[in-house]
Amino acid sequence: MSRPVSALLLLVLFYAVAFGLRTWQHMHATGSTGFRGVSGRPGSLEWLGGVLFAVGIFLSLAAGIGEALGWLRPLWQPCSWGAAVIVIGIAMTYAAQVSMGSSWRIGVREDERTQLVVEGAFALVRNPIFSCMLVTAGGFLLLLPNPLSVASFLCLWMAVEIQVRFVEEPYLLRTHGQRYRDYMAKVGRFIPSLGR
């Protein structure tokens, strides 16, 4: 199997696990998909974050298909161990999602109040799901370093920054107040001890 096809299959596996499997499990346990949609009005910074995330997904799939069909060439020497990074990222993303339990959501609904999760992976970083997704995207970039995969990684990174800084953290501060402030002071945003 060619490297681009392997990368594409791993990418599809990631989306199937992170969005399909986790959504199915959450629906089975709670009766809700956990999807809250894109926050903000069209044109707002919050809305832009959601759009960038969707564009990043599209570009990642296009990167794999484009290189598999010979339309794209690598920008630098691909790293075969990128596949291992992807597999580790998938497992870590899923573990972080599961550790949220019934509080797991994709997006924010202002009138909803969920439990503040600070144990497990959330004791190490405040946003372990996003951290692990970026690890997975980094592995994909190592394995399939073409222009569209670079653009996909940048879209995902910007989307995560916007979602965390302008949607989720303000919502959690409004919802949990001082308890979330104390948590922010102790635990890094994406990397342990950084961004406290």
Image: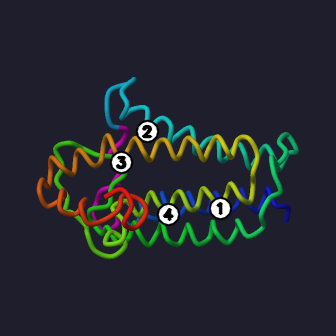
- For the magenta stretch, what is the residue range? 28-38
Outermost residue toward the left in this view: 178
Compare marks 1 and 3 and give the one earlier in the sequence: 1
Residue 48: image x %, image y %? 43, 32
Q: Which of marks 2 and 4 is in front?
A: 4
For the residues marked 1 and 2, what is the alpha-carbon distance in whole angstroms? 22 Å
Question: Which residue matches tag 3?
Answer: 164
Mark 1, residues whose alpha carbon is within 10 Å: few (<14), some, or many (≥20)? Answer: many
Residue at the spot 63% in from the left edge and 66% down from the top edge? 86
Compare marks 1 and 4 and give the one earlier in the sequence: 4
Q: What residue type is labelled 3?
A: Val
Please tell me whether the stretch drawn in magenta is mainly helix, strand or loop. loop
For the residues marked 3 and 4, what is the alpha-carbon distance in whole angstroms? 14 Å
For the residues marked 2 and 3, what is the alpha-carbon distance in whole angstroms? 11 Å
Q: Which of marks 1 and 2 is in front?
A: 1
Question: Which residue matches tag 4?
Answer: 132
Quarter of the figure with residue 85:
bottom right
Residue 186: image x %, image y %? 26, 66
Q: Residue 50 got which mark?
A: 2
